[in-house]
Amino acid sequence: VQLQASGGGLVQAGGSLRLSCLASGRTLGSYAIGWFCQVPGKEREFVAVINWSGVSIYYADSVKGRFTISRDNAKNTVYLQMNSLKPEDTAVYYCASSVRRVNSGSFATYYQRGSSYDDWGQGTQVTVSS
């Protein structure tokens, strides 16, 4: 599946952005979708994941209560609503897809790993000014 992330931009601290991850080539409804972020010189970090049905969701501790992941399978799109943004949220954000399904007990651990994903989008830059 091809993924295209969009919605990034420049925003002041405390502001909001909504990222979108549009899938093409195959229906998104079969895939878990994760969001990751990366700052130059640092390793890619997990942000959030949503399973194929939208029932299971998991967030990194750093974004809990501020970010919300959701999906609209009819539009082949997954969203990441980012509120109360902080300068430390500045990064390139990537969405990724995984066709594998795991049980609820393994969900968080499995999908935090970048290696659990098969396809990646090109990334969208988020810059939060102080």
Image (tube, helix red, strand yellow):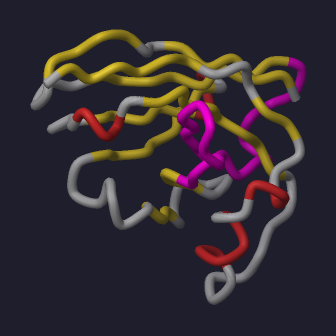
Instruction: Tell whether position 27 is magenta.
Output: yes
- The spot of residue 26 in percent (x, y) is 87, 27
How many discs appear?
0
Note whether 105 is above or below 100 in the view shown: below
Which residues lie in the magenta part?
25-46
User: Residue lying furthest front in this view?
Assistant: 41
Note whether 45 is above or below 100 in the view shown: above
Q: Residue at x 52, y 38 (%)?
A: 71
- The spot of residue 63 in percent (x, y) is 32, 54
- The spot of residue 107 in percent (x, y) is 65, 75
Q: Which quadrant of the figure has residue 15?
A: top left
Q: Which quadrant of the figure has residue 61?
A: bottom left
Q: Is residue 46 left or right of residue 130?
A: right
The quadrant in which the C terminus is found is top left
User: Residue lying furthest bottom in this view?
Assistant: 105
Q: Is residue 85 left or right of residue 96?
A: left
Q: Is residue 128 left or right of residue 4?
A: left
Q: Residue at x 23, y 48 (%)?
A: 66
Q: Which quadrant of the figure has residue 28?
A: top right
The quadrant in which the N terminus is found is top right
Note whether 96 is above or below 66 in the view shown: above
Q: Residue at x 78, y 33 (%)?
A: 120
Instruction: Tell whether position 67 is magenta.
Output: no
Q: Is residue 6 left or right of residue 99?
A: left
- The spot of residue 27 in percent (x, y) is 80, 31
Q: Residue at x 63, y 89 (%)?
A: 105
